[in-house]
Image (cartoon, rainbow, N blue to C red):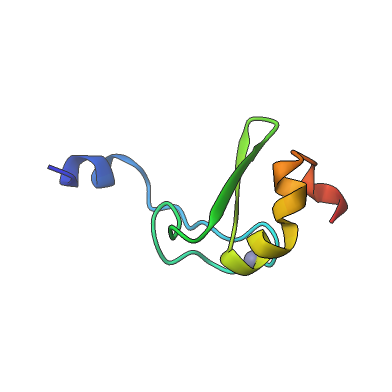
Amino acid sequence: MDDEKSNAGEARETSCTGCGKAAREVPVPVSWVSSHEKGEARYFCENCARENIRAIEGRLDSSWW
Ligand SMILES: [Zn+2]
C-alpha cells in the first residue's frame, strides 16, 4: 500500500545542508536532522547535526555557518 505514496512524489535527491552529502534514503536517514527555516526544509547529516545541534535548536539561520 506504500507504492502509491512513493510513486506520487518525484524522486528528489536530498542532500545535507551543511556538507552537501547526499542522503541515500527518502526522505532522509533516521539519523539525520531536519530543520525548517523560512518554510523551507533543510536536512543535516549526523555529523553536521552533531556539530550544529545548538544552532539548529536555537532556530538560527544556517547561512552564517
Ligand atoms: Zn553534513
Residue 46 drawn above or below residue 38? below
Q: Which residue is at a point 70% across and 43% down the rendered structure image?
A: 57
Q: Which residue is at a point 70% across and 31% down the rendered structure image?
A: 38
The quadrant holding residue 2 is top left
The quadrant holding residue 44 is bottom right
Q: Residue furthest top?
A: 39
Q: Which residue is at a point 39% across and 61% down the rendered structure image?
A: 25
Image coordinates for residue 61, horizontal then vertical, percent: 79, 42
Q: Does residue 44 appear to the left or right of 7 in the view shown?
A: right
Q: Does residue 22 appear to the left or right of 54 in the view shown?
A: left
- In the image, 49 versus 65, the foreground residue is 49
Q: Does residue 27 appear to the left or right of 33 in the view shown?
A: left
Which quarter of the rendered picture does the N terminus lie within? top left
Answer with the quadrant where ligand 1 appears in the image.
bottom right
Q: Which residue is at a point 71% across and 47% down the rendered structure image?
A: 56
Which quarter of the rendered picture does the C terminus lie within? bottom right
Image coordinates for residue 30, horizontal then vertical, percent: 43, 57
Image coordinates for residue 58, horizontal then vertical, percent: 76, 41
Q: Residue furthest right?
A: 64
